[in-house]
Image: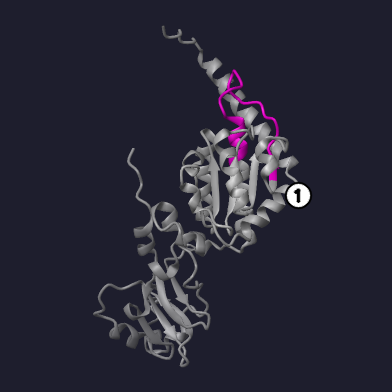
Amino acid sequence: MSAALAQLTPLDQLRSGREVVRLEGEALLDLARTLDASFCAAVDLVANCEGRVVVTGMGKAGLIGQKLAATLSSTGTRSHFLHPAEAVHGDLGCLHPQDVLLALSNSGETEEINQLLPTVVRLRVPIVAVTSTDRNSLASRADVVIQIGRLREACPWGLAPSTSTTAMLAVGDALALVASTQRGFTPQQFAVFHPAGSLGRRLKTVAEIMRPLQSLRVAQASDTVREVFVRFANVGRRSGAVLLLTAEGSLAGMFTDSDLARLLERRRDNAFDGPISSVMNSSPLTVLPESTFADVVDLLADRKISELPVVDESGAPVGLVDITDVIGWLPPQSGD
């Protein structure tokens, strides 16, 4: 016979939901205060790992372990998840002495994990344990023990893994991110592992989205305004800017269609037969090819500009970012 459904009012639902979040949040704050030298030792093992960080855990802790393996991989630490039950049936062959084992078990007495530990020790693979205390079977075999404490689970009966798995997730994230920082992992490296979706767009480099120099209007700063625009009268797909070069080939300035419109509005006809350098923007904002798409979007929005020259480290132009191209790279807006 199925149990009768509890009749919870909306107020009861909110009260219970807030209590769950409060309990887990307080557990994380306590954990942040109690992290000690063991965490630092674990960071060093992960950051200096020459093989892979192999993450293992059973049940809910295993699901957290799969997420942590993905986080480690995406932040520059080679990693994969090893199911402890499969490990003792042959999958332990994936371990190598240069690896590090990250084992997750709240009790530290998970049978499937403890079965694989003797082999891990024989292989001389360092073990980092994330567990409640340093007094359990897992902790006794580990090289480093990160204690999350004896936590009260957030479920009404104190049974369903909730607070403990939240703590494991937070510790694992901290371990992955601090190790990544210690190894000097960069946003550009992060972008390599995230080429798709909105995150991938934000992390694309300027070199991937810019218009190359050969497709742009480029002239010498000593040319006249009339010469420049007569020369490019029949150009194909054009940007709203002309890049102007010094005799040495570096960027001298930029002249835009808006600059041309201002000359016409102010009836400065005499300027058309003078050097374009006298009316160009001689100090346009520029970006490097390795800048990110997100950087470009912020610059265009903050400075309210439509064209952004791309230069190399010597100051020579290599391309241009046009706002119409940026709009094309933005994620589509969802309908109402």
Q: Is residue 202 above or below residue 213?
A: above
Instruction: State yes or no: residue 99 in magenta.
Output: no
Q: Is residue 235 above or below residue 14?
A: below
Which one is in front, 43 or 17? 43
Q: Residue at x 44, y 88 (%)?
A: 221
Here the colouring is: one colour
Q: Residue at x 45, y 58 (%)?
A: 193
Q: Say which element carries label 1.
A: helix
What amino acid is found at the position of numbered circle 1 in the picture?
Ala
Left or right: 51 in relation to 198:
right
Q: In this view, does 305 lie above or below 77?
A: below
Left or right: 10 in relation to 209:
right
Residue 155 location (% of width, % of height)? 58, 22
Q: Name the residue under label 1.
A: 37
Q: In the rendered image, which quarter is residue 156 located in?
A: top right
Q: Is residue 248 above or below residue 191?
A: below
Judged by its main secondary structure, the magenta piece is loop
The image quadrant where one finds the C terminus is top left
Instruction: State yes or no: residue 152 in magenta.
Output: yes
Which one is in front, 319 or 278? 319
Q: Is residue 329 visible?
A: yes
Residue 106 location (% of width, % of height)? 63, 34
Number of residues whose C-alpha sits closer than 10 Å to that of mark 1, classed few (under 14), some (14–19) or many (20 or more): few
Q: Is residue 297 visible?
A: no
Which one is in front, 12 or 77? 77
Which residues lie in the magenta part? 145-169
Which one is in front, 260 or 322? 322
